[in-house]
Amino acid sequence: MRPSRTHLVLIPTYNAGALLLRTVREARAAWAPVWVVVDGSTDGWDAALAPIEAGDPGLRVFRLPRNAGKGAAVLHALREADRLGFTHALVMDPDGQHPADRIGEPMAASAAAPEAMVLGQPVFGADAPLERVLGRRLSNWWADLETLWAGIGDPLFGFRVYPVRPLLEEMTRHRWMRRFDFDAEAAVRLCWRGVQPMKLPVPVRYLSRAEGGVSHFHYVRDNLLLAFMHLRLVLGFLPRLPRLLRRRLAGRPG
């Protein structure tokens, strides 16, 4: 496989266990290059990536000294990606939820419309926890309101292709988007910036513990983080409302 000079796969990871190796192997089978950002993991599984990286020029591993959050890990890689001239990054989780064998589809969509962000839309199976599925509807509604229904869809599903430079500039401008709030806030702020959202249905899996499934979602902590995120986004939305209305009436995003 010839490595892309514009589009890379980015996998931020924190204590994902053995699923990390499987995800990286599947991602490399589908795309090159693949970058992994180890966000202060302590489970030791990232050590198994070292011999793979040594023999595979399509894989690059970054190691952060302490856990700083998904968004912080993404930001670390975006800076390097921009420096090297990459224009787009597909961000995906290491825990088996996102289908690595579908990487080519959003990448092709992004190549056809490089000004857009390609947002995966989860197609839930019977293994999806009901409380997670129902809880997402509230975030969906808030994100729709904050963008005047520009077409984000599910703001929490992290299998998506971002244009590197706009996302990097937004993250550098704000102190937020560093932890669990990254996915939703990044999509909203890019919409405000005028980046066109493109939706693409993607099957999602919730692996059981017996299958090696790992979840770092903390119901109280992370829902409070999302509530605070939507509060500041609504406060940011209000002064933007006239401009957003003009854009929407003109048929443009955000």
Image (cartoon, helix red, strand yellow):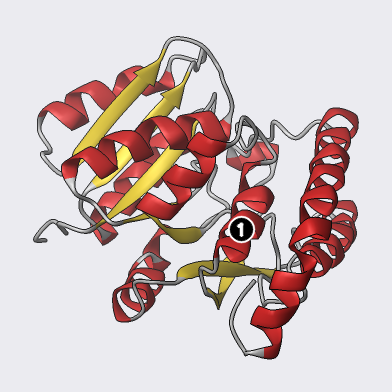
Is 105 left or right of 51, judged from the image as shown? right
**Which of the 4 image quarters holds residue 78?**
top left
Residue visible at 88% across and 55% down in the picture: 135
Where residue 84 sits in the image (x, y, percent)? 17, 42
Identify which residue, 141 or 188, lies in the foreground.
188
Where residue 80 sits in the image (x, y, percent)? 27, 35
Tell me if residue 18 comes above or below residue 112 in the rendering.
above
Residue visible at 55% across and 17% down in the picture: 67
Is 179 left or right of 236, judged from the image as shown? left
Crowd tier of the residue under label 1, counting other residues whose Cα lies within 10 Å: few below 14, some 14–19, many 20 or above: many
Tell me if residue 195 comes above or below residue 86 in the rendering.
below
Where residue 37 sits in the image (x, y, percent)? 39, 30
Tell me if residue 87 comes above or below residue 249 in the rendering.
above
Residue visible at 27% across and 42% down in the picture: 81
Q: Is residue 205 visible?
A: no
Q: Quadrant of the C terminus?
A: bottom right
Identify which residue, 152 or 51, lies in the foreground.
152
* Residue closest to the far bottom: 250
Q: Quadrant of the N terminus?
A: bottom left
Is 52 left or right of 191, judged from the image as shown? left
Residue on which disc 1 sits: 187
Is 15 left or right of 143, judged from the image as shown? left
Residue visible at 33% across and 52% down in the picture: 27
Where residue 151 sits in the image (x, y, percent)? 67, 77
The kind of residue on which mark 1 rests is Ala
Identify which residue, 235 or 217, lies in the foreground.
235
Q: Label 1: state its secondary structure.
A: helix
